[in-house]
Image (spheres, rainbow, N blue to C red):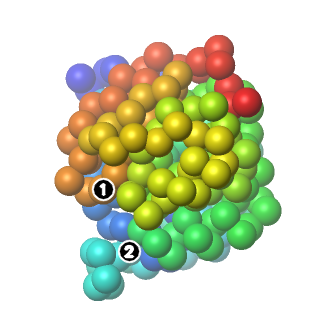
């Protein structure tokens, strides 16, 4: 599996308050599959991880949003945590970065509360998705079809509900990222 994503660059967009396992586990899986990952954030330095309600470890940021272009990446990961996507969805550069992936049909993997940023980027209408249960109404109101499943894949968009879903999430994420761009971008 070490060569499956060789040559692929993957952006992991996160800020303070990300759910630690939802960033570190996919990052490790992607690296093991041969991808180059970069943690992209609103600020340089380190960002604070969370283990549900408790502080976790800090993670080093590779590049800030001001330093990157979505065109330089093949795929995008959006970890959850409550504060992380709630902050990202209020930042115009973050929203535009996410929208660029969706518009280009590049694969995106979002877990837990991660889809909040996809909603703000107008990237969920007509898509089949899952998420942390509290986002169900938000996703439906934004035009998505929501279901309570371990992992849902819709033309390059991979979504899962929570850290317990990470094994299935990572398998499908790697599969979709290996396939590359999909012809159906978000409507």
Please identify the quarter of the rendering in which residue 92 is found: bottom right
Name the mark on residue 136: none
Q: Residue at x 52, y 22 (%)?
A: 155
Total labels: the figure holds 2
Please identify the quarter of the rendering in which residue 15 is found: bottom right
Left or right side of 35 for 107: right
Residue to which mark 2 is pinned: 49
Residue 21 vs 3, above or below: the answer is below
Q: Which of these two is toward me, 148 or 64?
A: 148
Farthest residue, direction bottom: 54
Residue 16 vs 138, above or below: the answer is below
The reply to whether residue 39 is visible in this rendering is: no
Residue 49 picture location, percent across and down: 38, 74
Q: Residue at x 47, y 16 (%)?
A: 179
Q: Is mark 2 on a helix, strand or loop?
A: strand
Left or right side of 152 for 63: right
Residue 174 picture location, percent across and down: 36, 29
Q: What element carries label 1?
A: loop
Residue to which mark 1 is pinned: 162
Left or right side of 47 for 64: right
Q: Residue at x 26, y 26 (%)?
A: 2
The reply to whether residue 95 is visible in this rendering is: yes
Neighbours of disc 2 within 10 Å: few (<14), some (14-19), many (20+): many
Neighbours of disc 1 within 10 Å: few (<14), some (14-19), many (20+): many
């Amino acid at each position: 599996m070490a060569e499956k994503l060789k040559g692929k660059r993957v952006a992991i967009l996160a800020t303070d308050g990300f759910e630690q396992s939802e960033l570190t586990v996919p990052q490790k899986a992607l690296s093991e599959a041969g991808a180059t990952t970069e943690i992209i954030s609103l600020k340089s330095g380190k960002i604070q991880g969370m283990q549900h309600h408790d502080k976790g470890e800090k993670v080093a940021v590779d590049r800030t949003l001001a330093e990157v272009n979505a065109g330089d990446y093949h795929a995008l990961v959006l970890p959850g945590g409550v504060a992380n996507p709630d902050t990202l969805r209020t930042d115009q550069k973050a929203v535009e970065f996410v929208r660029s992936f969706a518009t280009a049909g590049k694969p995106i993997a979002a877990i837990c509360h991660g889809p909040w940023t996809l909603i703000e980027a107008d990237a969920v209408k007509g898509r089949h998705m899952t998420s942390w249960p509290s986002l169900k109404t938000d996703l439906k109101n934004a035009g998505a079809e929501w279901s309570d499943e371990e992992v849902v894949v819709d033309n390059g968009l991979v979504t899962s509900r929570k850290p317990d879903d990470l094994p299935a999430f990572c398998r499908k994420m790697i599969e979709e990222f290996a396939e590359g761009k999909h012809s159906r971008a978000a409507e």
